[in-house]
Amino acid sequence: MTAWLSIVGIGEDGIEAISPSATRAIESATLLVGGERHLAMLPEDERERKTWPSPLMILVNEIMARRGEKICILATGDPMQYGIGVTFAKRLPAEEIAIFPSRSAFSLAAARLGWDLARTDTITLHGRPLEMIIPHLAPDARILALSDSGETPSRVAHLLTSRGLGESVMAVLEHMGGAREGIHQGTADQFAGKSFRDFNTIAVHCPPQSNAKMYPSIPGLADEAFEHDGQLTKREVRSATLSALGPFPGQLLWDIGAGCGSVAIEWMRCDPRNRAIAVEARKDRFDLIEKNRVNLGVPQLKTLNATAPDALVGLEAPDAIFIGGGLNVEGIFEASWKALKPGGRLVANAVTIEGEQRLFQLHDSYDGALTRLNYSRAEKIGGFTSWKPFRQITQLRLVKE
């Protein structure tokens, strides 16, 4: 099938600035789809027009049901950068879509500010939780974020200030590329409480040196970064566990018996594309996961307050599984191993003799790598210093061939 769906990106410079091929795509369509602002740019005619509803997927599904008709979608900027083009590219082969991008907000902002786009983190806060900016906060980091509304810059400024980053340099770039373009610059503590026009992009430059609340993406966050009741995979063990799990970008982890969610959260912080499902039966610990996933910038972590193995039925097949608790519960390992994708990794930790015995049994049956982890931390005893050992951890790592 040849391209029947056209997606045309339009900048603030309007319909006059698009290419001749994009113009022909608009002229040949029998159905035009877009926001009211985009459709108002076109001359009136008898063709069918539709604006985006809420939820968006209502019209996406209707367009898919009309597959083969000449349909043109009008979008903002580059439709393949957090735009509607991505939505349809997931559902259609490339040969059925013709995409005509305009200049993206990120390219325009980098040009206005003189930033190296290759060394700048680009994210979207449009329709997404504000906390998704948190993992990108780092010394001297430069971040460009698509805004959700005119209030988003103030909310970002407040978040930065609350984390000790009020001196971060910010810019709010409104209606770039058009007659109404405006750029406002200042620091985060100056922008808190201010309103801007809805169509804006936010730039943040974190200070190069700061004692603010910023955490690296490498696994092994300080235990104090998490709210917990003592049921926490300690920093040293957590780092070794994440290394054994081997996160690859975009992969899905099941964290079973998640406690306060530390392993799942660190898995997701390794790469913004990573996904995880944290399963925790106890409500008090589940509530801790809910707090930690927001505070540490992974609000998209999926959480289940339920008991395994029943909670695992119907979940998307994982690329990796961590069993941090409940290994001896009947059926948990079997259900996990069955669901794990080929080539996937399963890591289980045990601190009890009974749990260790179960790992020995699994090692006999499935082989894998069996490791014993012994760590100690130096602590003061009066005027002296002594080593305080952790509970010994036995760890099994299996790869599903």
Image: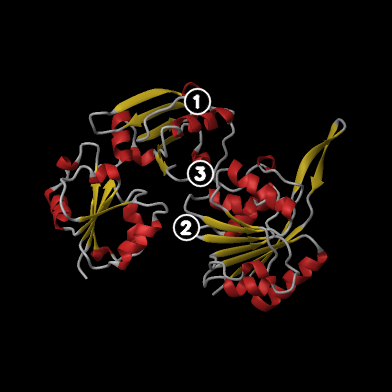
Q: How many marks?
A: 3
Location of mark 1 (residue): 192
Residue 214 seen in this snapshot: yes
Q: Position of residue 344 (x, y in %)?
A: 54, 68
Q: Is residue 50 above or below residue 142?
A: below
Q: Residue at x 54, y 68 (%)?
A: 317
Q: What is the CA distance from the residue labelled 3 to the residue labelled 1?
A: 18 Å
In the rendered structure, are the residues bearing label 3 and label 1 in contact, judged by CB atoms less than 8 Å apart? no
Q: Position of residue 105 (x, y in %)?
A: 31, 39
Q: Secondary structure at mark 1?
A: loop
Q: Secondary structure at mark 3?
A: loop
Location of mark 3 (residue): 129
Q: Is residue 202 above or below residue 76?
A: above
Q: Amino acid at mark 1?
A: Ala
Q: Earlier in the sequence, mark 3 or mark 1?
A: 3
Location of mark 2 (residue): 250
Q: Amino acid at mark 3?
A: Pro
Q: Is residue 68 above or below residue 276?
A: below
